[in-house]
Amino acid sequence: MNKRLVVLGAGESGVGAALLGNQLGFSVFVSDAGSVSQVFINQLDAHNIEWEGGQHSTERILQADIVVKSPGIPPHVPIVTAIKDKGIELVSEIEFASRYTSGTIVGITGTNGKTTTAMLAHHVLKSAGKSVALAGNLGVSFAKAVADENPDYWVLELSSFQLEDLRDFHPHIAVMTNLSPDHLDRYDNNYDRYADAKFNMLQKQTSEDYFIYDANDKDIQKGLLRNGPKSKCIPFTETTIHDKNLKSIDMNTIDNASLRGTHNAKNAMAAAAIAHLRKLHLQQ
């Protein structure tokens, strides 16, 4: 009997996880408490994936071997609590997708600037001659992308919601652009809980991995003290990357006249650090 995969949420993330699970041979059921967009209905029906909208059929959901929770679903709704109480494995779409790719993952999070940084990182890696795909909170879901391609590198833009319910996921290169209060209603108006959700990306990193971050961001500094990552830390400012190996920074690889101002300079420096880590540490 195929393993039973239940996906909570029939949006971009959930349908992506369903398509990947179906491709992998799982018995897939998608459940959404709200209405389901016709676009996603068409995708599910085209692959003969069972789904429901407007409700969660608790009895069927609790027969799952693994549940993938879409990022838009809060962590304490009754169906999620019931899944946890029964001891069913509950993971994010990011966690699920990461188990089925061999590509090197570059994960980019932060309150602001992560889209620009992700696009720059994609550009510099592609310019270096490696196959690279952009996914996550930007473009298609990670799971949908994994179902369709297998590049050398993944550049993932990741929100705090997407970084919940992780188990083993860890990017080889993690980037945090900055931190400021956002989405606090999700975290009981506790800023530290929001920041720590971002730092979930680092929890399973090892000494062979890298963490690139804004050296001047005081809230990132506080998060570092609370979370203590094991990865190699590479702080940057708008003018400097603080790593002994990164001695020559060729900013021409990401030069763009539209990227002006301190924030954009920092985004560019983060992308430059990614490019040089690839050149100095990741070439095979």
Image (cartoon, helix red, strand yellow):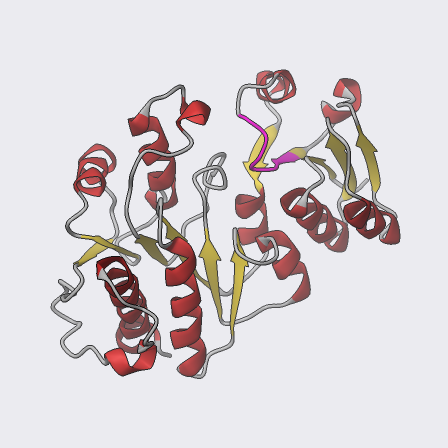
Relative image position of residue 112 (x, y in whole percent)? 35, 49
Quarter of the view holding residue 62: top right
Our reading of the magenta stretch's main secondary structure is loop
On screen, residue 252 above or below 6: below
On screen, residue 166 above or below 63: below
Identity of the residue drawn at 87% across and 53% down: 46
Relative image position of residue 213 (x, y in whole percent)? 24, 53
Question: Could you say which is closer to the camera, residue 229 or residue 178?
Answer: 178
Identity of the residue drawn at 45% across and 49% down: 158
Q: Is residue 51 left or right of residue 241?
A: right
Is residue 199 a member of the stretch shown in magenta?
no
Quadrant including the C terminus: bottom left
Quadrant including the N terminus: top right
Q: Is residue 199 left or right of residue 149?
A: left
On screen, residue 132 above or below 91: below
Identity of the residue drawn at 52% across and 64% down: 134
Task: State whether residue 99 appears in this view.
Answer: no
Q: Give the residues drawn in magenta, as a range.
A: 67-74
Relative image position of residue 44 (x, y in whole percent)? 81, 47
Relative image position of residue 58 (x, y in whole percent)? 75, 19
Count the marks: 0
Task: State whether residue 79 appears in this view.
Answer: yes
On screen, residue 121 above or below 213: below
